[in-house]
Image (tube, rainbow, N blue to C red):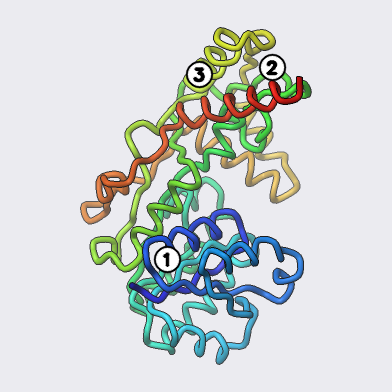
Amino acid sequence: MVKVLVLGATGFLGSLIAKEAVKLGHQVTALVSEESHIKKKQIVDGLKASGVQIKTGSLESDHKDLVDVLKTVEVVVSAVNGPGLAAQTKLVAAAKEAGTINQFMPSEFSAFGAVGEASAPLLYGPKAQVRAALEAAGIPHTYIVSYGFASYWANGLGELGQKNRVPPSPSSSNRVPFYGTGRTKLVMNVEEDIAAYTARAIGDVRAINKQLHVRPPLNSLSQHDMAHIWEDKVFRQLCIGSRLDRSFVPIAELEQRIASAQDPIKKTFLQLQKTFTVDGVTTPMGPQDVEASRLYPDYFYTPIAKYMNNLIDTFRTQLAAEE
């Protein structure tokens, strides 16, 4: 049993990690802001019901308060996003002073290191600052490299942000943009699996000061691969609608969109689109790095093809209930 502090526990991934860690027998505390206590009451209540202890506070808390909290735990797992990414340096400083932290998992996930920084600097730059602070402080750490989230990529058949394309709905368009050739392999994982592997790495000495890559063998598909799964299930088996209308976006056009984007969030989304579906970037595994499905072979992850089929089956069941 390890005493764990989770930040970002009221977010989707953070909530999954906190609950999974409890299931594995760890003593889990979630640091929850006063605002989230009110706005995310249902999620907070769900955390409590699962056995997660709630501590009021945030990355904006005073340094002394953060130190006091960290003195009560051994492992920190962060799943914050947005402005919270850069603010994690405050937590690193507090962890150094507390002197009790045996493992710190910053909010890394996705791609990693130089690969991410070169592709989407606004997103990955703050993460690099946190890694540098951790390593300078000499705090043992584990970096989770989880690549694409299934609900962001598989649901949109490789189009980032189109989370309602799968399962199909009457309002969904059958026109799908394929970036470049559409044949570049994209690594993606179901969020529950990312959380499960993260929780299993808590307190595991085999993951200390290493990158833990969530890169199972069945979770690398191209846009064409995903489209074939969608068409086979929806059109051939369920006889819904017509076949997908593929529209190809040349690399030059995508690069032009990135260059002309004024909104930083839109620019980052477009940069990620190119990184994953055109460049097919994966983070190189160093000699000391570990791959999650090999390190934890007892855990049965969900292949992306099965994930997509399950989504469409759920949709079909809903349709039948409405008829």
* Residue 126 screen position, x and y as percent: 55, 63
Rendered image quadrant of residue 241: top right
Q: Left or right: 78 with respect to 166?
A: left
Q: Which residue is at a point 63% across and 80% down the rendered structure image?
A: 56
Q: Which residue is at a point 67% across and 23% down the rendered structure image?
A: 168
Q: Are marks 1 and 3 in contact (CB under 8 Å)?
A: no
* Residue 119 screen position, x and y as percent: 52, 45
Quadrant showing the C terminus: top right
* Residue 205 screen position, x and y as percent: 24, 66
Q: Which residue is at a point 38% across and 40% down the rendered structure image?
A: 301
On screen, 2 above or below 72? above
On screen, 26 above or below 101? above
Alpha carbon distance from label 1 to label 3: 35 Å
Q: Which residue is mark 2?
A: 174
Crowdedness near tag 1: few (<14), some (14–19) or many (≥20) residues, C-alpha within 10 Å: many
Q: Mark 1 or mark 3: name the one nearer the start of the chain.
A: 1
Q: Which residue is mark 3?
A: 229
Q: Which residue is mark 1?
A: 105
Q: Which residue is at a point 44% across and 27% down the rendered structure image?
A: 221
| Residue 181 at least partly seen | no
Q: Mark 2 or mark 1: name the one nearer the start of the chain.
A: 1
Q: Secondary structure at mark 2?
A: loop
Q: Mark 2 or mark 3: name the one nearer the start of the chain.
A: 2
The amino acid at mark 1 is: Met
The amino acid at mark 2 is: Asn
Crowdedness near tag 2: few (<14), some (14–19) or many (≥20) residues, C-alpha within 10 Å: some
* Residue 57 screen position, x and y as percent: 63, 80
Extreme residue in the right direction: 171
Q: Left or right: 202 with respect to 288?
A: right
| Residue 220 at least partly seen | yes
Q: Which is in the foreground here, disc 2 or disc 3?
A: 3
